[in-house]
Image (tube, rainbow, N blue to C red):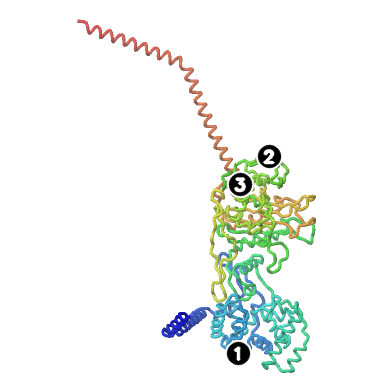
Amino acid sequence: MKLFHSAQEAIIRFWKKNHITQIFLLVSLVFILLTILFFAFMASRANVQTLKDGLSQATIIYDKDGDIASTLSTNRTKGVKVEELPDHVKNAVISIEDERFYEHNGFDIKGIARAFIKNIFALSITGGGSTITQQLTKNALLSPEQTYKRKIEELFLAVEIEKHYEKDEILQMYLNQVYFGSGAWGIGSASKKYFNKPIDQVTISEAALLAGLLQSPSALDPYQNYDRAINRRNTVLAKMKELGKITTEEYKTARNEQIKLEDGGGSFIERSYPYYVDAVLNEAIGEYGLTQDEILTRGYRIYTEMDQNLQASLEKVYKRNALFPRSQDPAVMVQSGAVLLDPHSGGIRGVVGGRGDYVFRGFNRATQLKAQPGSTLKPLAVYTPALEQGYETTSMLVDQQMEFSSYQPENSSKTYQGEIPMYKAVENSVNIPAVWLLDKIGLAKGLDSLRRFDIPYEKQDEHLAIALGGMHKGVSPQQMAEAYSVFANKGNRAESHFITKIVGPTGKIIAERKVTTKDVTSKKVANDMTAMLLNVVETGTGQRTKLPNVQIAGKTGSTQLPYNDINGTKDQWFVGYTPNLVGAVWLGYDMTDRQHYLPNSSSDTVVPIFRAIIEQSLPYVEPGEFETQSVNSQLSQDDHTEKVIKEKTEEVKKKAQEIEKLIVEESPKWKQTIEKGVQILIDISGKVKEKITDLSKP
């Protein structure tokens, strides 16, 4: 015990002798000072002088070339001038949101202290304590996250804003961009939405109701929660009376006033290329963390991968009703979705998500659909991994009725050839060889291939039926186009996307995409798949896609109806590509039943639609050439070479026979000549010998 006390006293002496407390305080103060300087410096760099212009501007969507493709504007962008607002409107908002608005320099110490204590007791960042200037800062310049870092940024930026704008300018910016619920941005739109009157005609009671909505626009929506909205209105009126903004008599009159709601339309949204623009908003919200309110109120500049020519041509095709099957039910239209993307960058060049009427950010069948892909999945789940395992495009596959552990698929034609080369199985979309081949290489290989192609599947999908596109949830045209881009891009996959960059109203880059690609398969395998998919268009199920002097590779697909007594299909697909453009088209009904289904095959319906899309795109896309030829062309060349070799061989053989015949015919003459020559040599030899003998005599 004495040892413990001695150690404690030693520590205390050391602490006092070395002034640890003062050092700790000094370090803390230096840290706080540096933090303040850092945030002050960052705030000073923000171009807040452009804030007013940015908030009054529409968000602009740019295409891949940096040209304006669309403006995303609401009637909020015009807004109202603060001079047009009645005093009771301004007073209602200031009283409940920031009662010392005209007194502080951007932040309110009392409000911050009150909010800080509240947050401590809540053990989390619950908000509160923000002035109107801070709320403007948060809505216009910062993300909606609730962190102390963001709150500090908000405070310093608010001070910076107060340096550059008058109080009434700040109030005007705030009231014109803030959300009042029910699709109404800005107080002018809110007045139309709830009362069908201009803002300068609202009563004190109505002004208080609008001001009250700012706390929670959805929860206090008077169309949905009238009593809660009225209670909040009464709270605002009481605060106005407390601050002397209205008299007791005005308070009583306003509180007793019966609010009559009348929907005058509120905000409206104008934009060109609605499906593409809405897909851009979805990506900005889902991937980059922005909110719809931010995008519609901050005057962003969003740079995209859109090709306006391709987008316009795609929309033109979808207006040609004669291209699409006629529905048996006039009240329900056959639906479709299509996407075009650059296989090298993954940039989406054009998208249409449906036919007929379309609402703001409605369902997009090109990007949000989940449908079974049918036979378009075969190249991804079966034939690519098979080629990787050493199979060739000409490898023979089994094509006969068989059962795979109680799973018994069948060919759509109900005919079987015994065996068939791989390229023919792909070309004619034969089912049994695909299932047999997946079983041979192993289901795990097929599932691994789907993961590399970024095709999502469920636990229930881990079955041989996935060879034929059997999936519980399915895929979208965007996902299929991205997957097939691998074949056009030498085995690499670039993630499909709409946005390349987002710039805020002050010029700050909010987000910027870095293009990255992933290796999916080898260049040889990609080329082999392209060679087989070229066959599909040349002589297979996709022949009606064929265009003169244009290389198109692709695959048809369809899914069965759940009714055995009806001959038809549920979903129809064509996914195809040229060297520089990939497209995917889905066709079907949003809800398939006995009255709503497709009676024809994909070759008769969806294939001509894809052909029209590619035909319209030709003037705007570099044609290019594949590094391979169709299997048909390759085999034709092989046959030609074999024929030439055979002809040359026959020619050489014929010449040899002619020489042999000549030798046989001339051999007697050659024999006599040789014998005569030999005799002459013998005679000459005899004479020489005689001469030598004569010379040797004495």
**489 relative to 222, above or below:** above
Residue 589 x %, y %: 74, 58
Question: Farthest left residue?
Answer: 698
Image quarter of the C terminus = top left
Give the secondary structure at mark 1. Answer: loop
Q: Nearer the viewer, mark 2 or mark 3?
A: 3
Crowding at dot 1, Cα within 10 Å, few <14 / some 14-19 / many 20+, comes out as few
Question: Farthest front residue?
Answer: 1
Residue 685 x %, y %: 31, 11
Amino acid tagged 3: Ile
Q: Earlier in the sequence, mark 2 or mark 3?
A: 2
Q: Which numbered dot is residue 417?
A: 2
Whole-angstrom CA distance, mark 3 to mark 1, is: 75 Å
**423 relative to 28, above or below:** above
Q: Earlier in the sequence, mark 1 or mark 2?
A: 1
Crowding at dot 2, Cα within 10 Å, few <14 / some 14-19 / many 20+, comes out as few
**666 relative to 208, above or below:** above
Q: Is residue 505 visible?
A: yes
Q: Earlier in the sequence, mark 3 or mark 1?
A: 1
Residue nearer the viewer, 325 or 228: 228
Q: Is residue 552 visible?
A: no
Give the secondary structure at mark 3. Answer: helix
Whole-angstrom CA distance, mark 2 to mark 3, is: 21 Å
Q: Residue 187's quadrant in the figure? A: bottom right
Q: Are marks 1 and 2 in contact (CB under 8 Å)?
A: no
Quickly name the residue at label 1: 102
**Could you tell me how many numbered marks the image carries?**
3
Quickly name the residue at label 3: 441
